[in-house]
Amino acid sequence: MHFSLTSNCSPIVVLLSLVGLLLTSSSGCEEKKGQRLTINDSPSTPTASRAFPCMVMVIGEPAIAEPLQRQWSARYESAFNIKTVSIEEISKADFDIPQDVDVVIYPAQIMIELIHRGRIKELKDSVYQSDALNKNDLLKHFRKSGIRYDSKTWAVPCGGPLFALIYQPDALTRTETQIPEKWSQLILWAERLAQQKNDDSAAADGSAANTPTATQKIAVPLAEGWAAKTFIAMAAPYARQKGRLSVLFQRRTMKPLIASEAFTRALDELKTLAKLNPASLNMTPTDVLEALVNGQLAAGITWPTSAVSPTSDVAAAQTLLIHSLPGSNTYFDESTQSWGTRQSSDPNVVDLHGMNGLLASQTKNSRRPQSAAEFLKWLPESTISQTLFSADPSLGPFRTTHLGDTKAWIGDHFSREFETGFENHLKDAHDKALIMTLPKILRQSDYLAVLDTEIRAALADDVDSKKTLEKVAAAWEALTEETGRKTQSDLLRRNSNF
């Protein structure tokens, strides 16, 4: 019988080919299965973070670099690289971000510089809407005005402070004074405290020698870098009204409004407070808080932070209470050039939001966008952010869940009544629709520096308030021309933080 080799071998060849394909397929499946097991080996580790290590650059806050790296390393088995740079250095480099950087953490006031130059990109919706970020837990103005511009979300928040009035309740009792709801009432209280000091000094029995004179004073932070912000906070209820979008500049022309009657009145009142306590000219918010917790002031404008504790065994901070800043039921209407009265349903207090704070954004040219996204979800998470930022004296709570544990942010030397008052102060400030913010325009810090210098000079030498602010307005006009009026007015009109 004759067999054909070709015809008889074909089924064998086909069979062998099938076996080979099955082996190859099986090998491939085993490889994929192994990858999945490796990824799931550490459930708490984000996939993107393990596969694509993140590079972070911190601007202007070098102190957070080390704890940031430590916290990341404690939780994830992935490489984490971080570099720091000062605001001055990056400003000289035209805010250029190195190509290897995926995420940048920066002071809120330079957000517009980074957006305008295309250094950062809009926050991904997958980050903003994620359960990890939990945007609805963010306090309202961190969620809205703080991280948004031109109706877009650009960053995640890392915290920021809010001015408050911190006071010794006994000082109210001694002077038969109620909590000051208006700036004029705060001045009256300061004058009564000064009069009490004079009365004590005139006491025939010499008992005034045992009365610390500092406890009969009210301090406001007017040191270099703080006079402008304190001044704007005082002017806010006079300058801000419903329907008025921009307060410091006209939106379409960038004409400064800083010399209006609203700001002139605020400067006159600030000068009165400074005369009653000249030491304020050298005090930062931290200085004011230190004096308060050590029982050296009757009251002061600042905010609580865990970075400041009483220096003596007697915790004077236990007697302190906290309240919102004073306000005003009248405001200056720029359109009619006259003073108006708020409706009874409108709050008198207008809080200054966003004066300080940190933000984090993905860089425009991030090489590891998935890793950057995972990092931006992780950074503002409630417990992570509290661990990282609660000890920084320039920051503050930015989530509702942070309010359940304010001791982490303010320390454990305040009374429970103070803690509750602090929580309520933040809740109220973020519930209000009428607030004051600094405009997101280029060279914001330069405009503030001019204002700061002139305010301090006016306070020190008692220069006429109107002339001082007209000088500021002229300097602001020069800055606008130098930067580009059209550029600045276009940016101002696109502000969504009003």
Image (cartoon, rainbow, N blue to C red):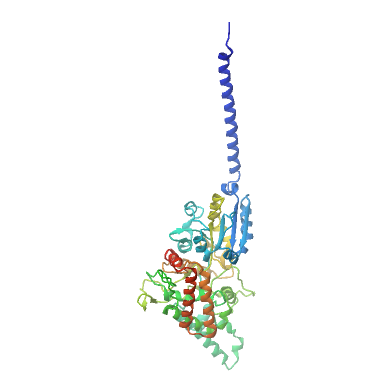
Q: Is residue 130 left or right of residue 244?
A: right
Q: Is residue 441 above or below residue 69?
A: below
Res. 150 image quadrant: bottom left
Image quarter where the N terminus lies is top right
Res. 84 image quadrant: bottom right
Query: In the image shown, does 317 or 243 lie closer to the viewer?
Result: 243
Q: Is residue 52 left or right of residue 439?
A: right
Image quarter where the C terminus lies is bottom left
Query: In the image shown, does 279 or 346 lie closer to the viewer?
Result: 279
Q: Is residue 220 above or below residue 143?
A: below
Residue at image coords 60%, 32%: 27
Q: Residue 126, image x and y in percent?
A: 48, 51
Q: Is residue 409 visible?
A: yes
Query: In the image shown, does 175 or 387 lie closer to the viewer?
Result: 387
Q: Is residue 5 left or right of residue 136?
A: right
Q: Residue 297, image x and y in percent?
A: 56, 79
Q: Residue 328, image x and y in percent?
A: 42, 77
Number of marks: 0
Q: What is the residue that sits farthest to the top in this orientation?
A: 1
Q: Is residue 49 above or below residue 389?
A: above
Residue at image coords 64%, 60%: 66
Q: Is residue 167 visible?
A: no
Query: In the image shown, does 410 or 24 lie closer to the viewer?
Result: 24
Q: Is residue 470 above or below residue 399?
A: below
Q: Residue 149, image x and y in percent?
A: 46, 61
